[in-house]
Image (cartoon, rainbow, N blue to C red):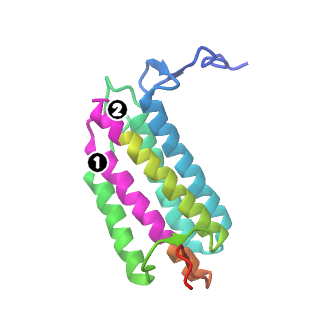
Amino acid sequence: MHELAGGGDDGTTGLLGGGRVAKDDLRIEVYGTVDEASSAIGLAKALTSDERVRDVAEQLQRGLYRLGAELATNPEDPGKFGTTSETDVAELDNLLATLEAEVGMPKGFILPGSTPASGALDLARTVVRRAERRCVTLIHEGGLANLHARRYLNRLSLLLFVLGRFEEARAGQEAKPARHRV
């Protein structure tokens, strides 16, 4: 049996770089939500038939992995496992601009789920928004000094919205407006 099996039975979990915190610690909530977002993106990746959407999804998952590692690092040793940087945010901005130039954006609110993959991307977007809200709280409480992490999550949620519309366009579908037109 693995020597760490059951190590969290006491309601704590280990941080990268050492130390333990309660499983309901805000830091754990943030990186757990980042992990949920990555899983939702993984679902979209598995559901799409478009190679470019799969490639972008995997790129986004790798970015979330890096962010999750940063958030899971003991705050007494920040940066030991890397940090989210201005360059990471700029990469999302560049990808966002590229995709926006290739697909039309809806004029109003939409109903998610025109395709299975776009529905999963919209689910991922909402999970990222939750991660961003929790990250803001972590920053306000002094648990995270790197403001690029918050900016990364903000840009990522917008990028996931655009990627969802891109997925729909590639599948020959269009997002339905949320408001029923009479």
Residue furthest out toward the top: 10
The residue at which mark 2 appears reads as 80
Mark 2: secondary structure: loop
44 shown above or below 63 = below
Location of residue 106 in the rendering, given as x and y in whole percent from the top left corner: 45, 79
Please identify the quarter of the rendering in which residue 170 is found. bottom right
124 shown above or below 144 = below
Q: CA distance from mark 2 to mark 1?
A: 16 Å
Disc nearer the start of the sequence (2/1): 2
The residue at which mark 1 appears reads as 148
Q: Residue at x 38, y 69 (%)?
A: 95
Residue furthest out toward the front: 182
The nearer-to-camera label among 2 and 1 is: 1
Question: Which sits in the foreground, 136 or 40?
Answer: 136
Residue 66 as seen in the image, left or right of residue 139: right
Residue 87 as seen in the image, left or right of residue 56: left
Q: How many marks?
A: 2
Q: Contact, CB < 8 Å: mark 2 with mark 1? A: no
Mark 1: secondary structure: helix
By secondary structure, the bulk of the magenta-drawn segment is best described as helix
Q: Label for residue 23?
A: none
**144 drawn magenta:** yes
Type of residue at label 2?
Lys
Location of residue 127 in the rendering, given as x and y in whole percent from the top left corner: 51, 51
Question: Which sits in the foreground, 9 or 141?
Answer: 141
* Magenta residues, start to end: 136-164
Type of residue at label 1?
His
104 shown above or below 134 = below
Please identify the quarter of the rendering in which residue 91 is found. bottom left
